[in-house]
Image (cartoon, coloured by chain):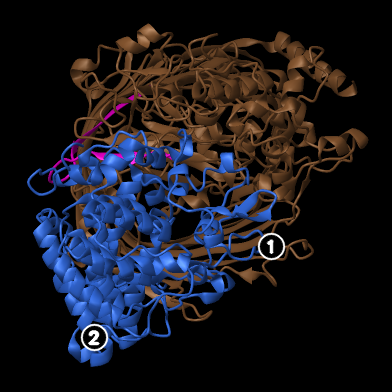
Chain colours: A brown, B blue
Amino acid sequence: MKKFLAIFLLLSASIAGFAQNARTVTGRITEPDGTPVISAMVIQKGTTNGAATDLDGNFSIRLSGDVVLEISSIGYETANVSVPSTQNVVDVILKQDAELLEDAVVIGYGVQNRRDVTTSIVSIKSDDLQNKTNSDFREMMAAKMPGVQVMQGGGRPTGDVTVRIRGIQSATAGNDPLYVIDGVPTESSVFSQMDASDIASIEVLKDASAAAIYGSRGSCGVILITTKRGAGEKPVISYDGYYGISQVSKKIDLLNAWEFATMFQEARNGSYLYNVPTGTISDPYADRPQTYHRSDNVVDLYLKDEAHTMTNTDWQDAIFRLAHTTRHAVSVSGQTPTVKYYVGANYLYREGTIINSDYTRYSARANVDGKKGRFKFGMSLSPSFSTEHYVESDSQYNSNGIIASALMAPPIFPVYNRDGSYNWDMNGYLRKHQWDTQCNEVLNPVALANETKDYREKITLVGNAYAAYEFIKGLEYKITVGGDYYGFARDYYRPTILPLRGNKYIEVVPDAVMAEDPNAHTTAALSQPSAKAWSYHYFHWNIAQQLSYTHKWGDHSLTAVAAYEAEKKINRTMSVQGAGTIGDDKIQTTKGVTLDIDNTLNNLTNYGFDSWLFRAQYSWKGRYMASASVRGDRSSRFGSNNRLGIFPAASIGWRMSDEPFMQNATWITDLKLRASVGQTGNAQIGNYDWLALYGISTIYMGDGNSVVNQVYPKQIQNADLGWEKNTQYNIGMDANLWQGLLGVTVDAYYSRTSNMLFNVPVPDASGFGTSNVNIGSMENKGIELNLTSRKHFSSGFFYDAYANWSLNRNKVLHLGDEDAPLIKTDSSEKGFYITQVGQPIGCYYLLVQDGIFHNQEELAKYPHFESTQVGDFRFIDVDGDGVMEADDDRAIVGNYMPDFYYGFGFTVGYKGLDLTAAFQGVYGNEILNLERRYLCNMEASSNMMKLSLERFPYGELNRATRKSTGNNGASMSTFHLEDGSYLRLQNLSIGYTFPKKWLSRAKISNLRVYLQGTNLFTLTNYTGYNPEVNRRPGDALRPGEDYCSYPLSRTFTVGVNFNL
Amino acid sequence: MKKITYILSLGLLMVSAASCSDAFFGQYPSNDITEGNFYQTEEDFNQGVYSCYAKLKTQSGFFISELAFRADEAYLESMAVSTQDRYDLDNFQENSSNPILSAVWAAWYNGIYRCNDVLDHMTEDMLSSAKMAQYRGECLFIRSWYNFNLYKVFGGVPLITKVVSPSEAKGIKRCSADEMLERLETDLTEAIKLLPQTRPSEKARVSKIAAQAMLGKVYLTFKKYPEAQAIFAEALKDPNYGLMATTADAFKVANKMNKEFIFALCYNKSNDFGHGYWWSTNTDVEADRHIPSEPTAALFDKEKDNRWPLIHDFIKISSSVYAMPKWYDTYDATYTTQVGNDFPLIRYADITLGYAEALGLGGNIPAAIPYLNMTRTRAGLAELPATAMSESAFRQELADELGREFTYEGHRWFDLVRLGLAVDYFKSLGYSLDDHELILPIPNAQIEIYNNDSILWQNPGY
């Protein structure tokens, strides 16, 4: 209260002073060349008294006495001007701030002014990365940059991110962009360990001309990370932290116990009536020939339970929870005349929304830069350590998958028995109690999550050191030595108390015993515990020497760089696996276990690169710009006949707005046209793909108990294996209209990948089914649009809005000698993918389901499978030959690649208050929802989705029967294919920045508090957890499959940032 | 001037550094053997030969299960998600994309490739003549095994006799029946010369009699009865092999690799090279278990034939596991799926019954009867009189005896096809089986890869 009073008095005093000697001061704020600076803030220092400049740069302000005016505008250096009481006109020239990251763009082996960039590069600055609740900072790039698609495969607390730039460039080599931290190429595994608070900017080199400077690794785009360096005269201590709670953003709508019982009985009756057409559903179970014709009395009891008093377990609720997240980040930065420093430390603890999963990360960074005369030097060091308790979220029900088990477990069984022990009825009670009703066994997912130990630890150490010397002005030599170490260790233990899956591992209690003892329950056999220890670590080093030259004369400006670099990566893996003793969980490591010889090993692999490059950039008055570069790479990954690749690029730019004829169009603040062409390569293949290799494993040859080694050929030599080359053309336009009121960037590109590394199917008669050859080509073409609008009003209101839209079309052009299509199966091996000339890569290739057969007449009229019955799926006779055949009647029915994707968002603020919203969307991608083959197969062999109630004759889905006929829901068709389009409110936050004057007494220079919601809602028709799911992000030929994945979470956070 | 010197020397520094040596790129994996350091010693070749044997096991399920479903020994009543492919084969609804067929095609050709890789690398200066003979004989034998099976399942197939590149492979067309016979005859005849007379201590390895037996079966398949008679007669002279007292004795786990097992897949549960129970069920209610199938059961005289209990009297292992006695081994209580039965691919009974077939279908039925009786009498059945019987009666007797002797050993389908009984028989059981289905469709994916009907064409009818 006292404080407020003091502030009030202070304000009154100033107003009083104002009243005494007030005068109006006017002036004009311009750039050095006289261009007016619009919307610059002119503030009497230490007060809230201020004004903004108009369209001509003019302002007027009421002042009294000797004051200092602080004049600021984004992109300019802030000026402080003393105005003595005698002065009434103040004209100020603001200098553009070249140092400000807002204008400088990191382009790889150098920095370029944003104005002069002639290639397609997008960036994000640190402000956009602040305070977001994601573990992996790449999630924050989602929908912020056109042409950059960031996909969240799942909601693991560590993050689960895939980045694709301008579509899919390669069929069988990787499609991940190259990541470069502070100039040193790095593995993406190090990335998830970085904390966003240490990042100053992220640049994405999208077109080949920009990426060609990274040559053989540039074809999927390059992401450059620049970390924060010291700045500011006074040391600044920053803190930011938040606390959040998360829950799954979606649950799948499943049958409750009574609905399950209905479907369970109906499916078995359905099977009975199919096999015994003369039967009726009132026939006693025991008289039916097959046990799967029979329901079980514990299930049938539910059909009489009208009061709904019996057990009804929501297994999803049982494995999901409200999860907590905490984060702290502290940093100190500053500079002296000779040294700049930035030191930061971060902590993140994030619980998963599945029980017993969490992630903890500690990381730190020290960046130091020094200068003595012409000599510059510096180093960065960034260690991190993280631990994760992992749960088996993405596996199937038969390999301990927690989500799959929870979705499939019958709701009629409880999680726990009355005595508090885990219930195991879901592991086959319905196959043993009366008879084998053929209900799939699953393990209790709560027990799986809680009792399995899967602990993972990562250590990273990323660092580099550089020294530079400027011989003459503009000519600098620089050597950088960088390295990154990554260590991963995993301890896995599946205890003896978790039984194996299958009814043979449980004993059920006979009904008679149960009647006596209500606490009696199914018991499960102890299993043989399995223990695994696995570690992987690598060291990667890079040495780069660089000679750069910058020269300006008259209206000309030239920058040139030449560099040579070499790098090597050494990977080591170690694995120890074995089985322990039944009944003994005392030691939960591999000590004392019976080793699994084939999986107990260590391995060492490595690869090397060396490269040289040249680049020159020329500009005349900033109006005509040209750039050319060439890089040569050699890599150990390629065959000895094809080891060297040369990657040239060129680009030009024209700042039209600087032309004399444009000077009258004052509404055009800036207009630049760009064109570029470049060639890049893809080296994301295995380290030894070109070598002839023999594998070794043990076999038994019938000699007592002795085991011998067999050596078998496993790879044919291919000395011609070479680079996959990508040639890309890009044209673009950057426009700034009405002084930032509207910013427009448009890019159009065409890229063609040739010499595509293709694991083409070859005749099995050659010994192998596939062979890796440089054959085939593919194109991507697209349009990207980015709009921005920002304005600060003198009233203190401001807004900043953006919208982006990206379209990419992929087409396979050539697939080797015969252009034979590549057909691949999905995880169930029932559905297919096809990669075919003239079509996008990895299309779904499925039977086309078209309703059901409602009656015998319909069945008689249309081609169908031999086993198809009334109530089964009707499929389209695609080839029109009047015969339904699984092989001939499949069609290309969609693709995981979206038609387009987009993002938009805004920040609005008034004085200290700000509100930010960010949306992201994808349109026209299809997902193969494999989980439906269990959850919507009408077999009631497990619990099912509510959707299954729409079965024939009640709805338009197939009839209920335990044994599907006619390729019903248990086989793959378009019934399993769903539209993955969505629009998501990715982020909504409201913050308040306290006025500085309130804080100055507490020596706080900045204080902001905020409330934030992440992933608040998603509009989609997709019935699974996440419409972006992709089971195999690394496999371009088989994308977009949902076969259980960690659901995304919805998070609410409250946080604070302050600077001292 | 000084500055320029600096710059020049710096440039030189960069250029000199810019030449990583070839060693920098000569990166090799630690856990793989590469072309350059293999096939140097006798033991290297031995390990290569092991790999040829190892490949036999990867498709054991085809012989143990799938062929029984294809034949009348087992059937699936209705399809389920997991058994669709088997169901299709079982019910003669096979199509060319059936993964079971593409898997055997790929595995057998990979096996041929392994044999060829060893054969191509082997030169006399690298091995002793004894080892050279043995390894070459084994590779020829195993390659013939794959070729013979490819022929029985798919008809004529491309014959690969050395390591070929993928593009070379595309030019090798399906062979005719004569070419296949010639290949098998040549390779097996050489193998018979090269292979040792006695079985090595590694009992999975073959000896001479295995190659003789296979060549005999090849002749039977190609209806070359005189040649078959000669080679079986030769094989019958081998004193090291013979019939055990009963079929049950031959299959007892205690009698592993006895004199009746000529060529088998060897398993061992005590060194982690065991397998799961074959043909076990989870119920002992006969109506529910369908094993043995009704047509198989009909072959047996259930009172007299001691081979009937071997496939019928299931042994309870636990409340939900019942093991077929033929494939019984004591239960491993750790629940790991480890039992240790060996799976015979050629038994001595193949030779006795093969000789009977060669004689009988070669026109001398009375001479054939004693050989047909050998397995009958040890099973407890009455001898058939060595009198003239019609060829069709003999054919039926032989088929039935083969069906009883080799139940669940993967023989039945090939026997019925070879003896020309399959189509009528399966029709009598109510199936619709057409002549063209006696061989199965070439995997469609392969047809598409060749994309050339004059090199790799689909079998007619598919």
Q: Amino acid at mark 1?
A: Ala
**Residue B290 on the magenta segment:** no
**Residue B143 sits above or below residue A258 on the image:** below
**Residue B117 sits above or below residue A154 on the image:** below
Q: Earlier in the sequence, mark 1 or mark 2?
A: 2
Q: Quadrant of the N terminus of chain A?
A: top right
Q: Chain of mark 1?
A: B
- Toward which corner of the image does residue A635 lie, by quadrant? bottom left
Q: Residue A113 appears at what percent x and percent y?
A: 35, 38
Q: Work out whether residue A1022 can be spotted.
A: yes
Q: Residue A347 appears at what percent x and percent y?
A: 69, 47
User: Quick one: A598 or A185, which is closer to the camera?
Assistant: A598
Q: Secondary structure at mark 2?
A: helix
Q: Please name the residue that numbered disc 1 is placed on.
A: B333
Q: Going by the picture, which residue comes out furthest to the left? A: B454
Q: Is residue B15 left or right of A463 when viewed as pictured? A: left
User: Quick one: A915 or B458, which is closer to the camera?
Assistant: B458
Which mark, by number, is residue A797? Answer: none
**Residue A974 sits above or below residue B437 on the image:** above
Q: Which residues are magenta?
A: A805-829
Q: Classify mark 2: residues with Cα within 10 Å, few (<14), some (14-19) or many (20+).
A: some
Q: Work out whether residue A344 can be spotted.
A: no
Q: Chain of mark 2?
A: B
User: Quick one: B8 or A203, which is closer to the camera?
Assistant: A203
Q: Mark 1 to mark 2: distance in Å? A: 44 Å
**Residue A825 on the magenta segment:** yes
Q: Secondary structure at mark 1?
A: loop
Q: Residue A551 appears at what percent x and percent y?
A: 26, 49
- Tell me which residue sits at (13%, 44%) in the image: B457
User: Quick one: A318 or B86, which is closer to the camera?
Assistant: B86
Q: Please name the residue that numbered disc 2 is placed on.
A: B133
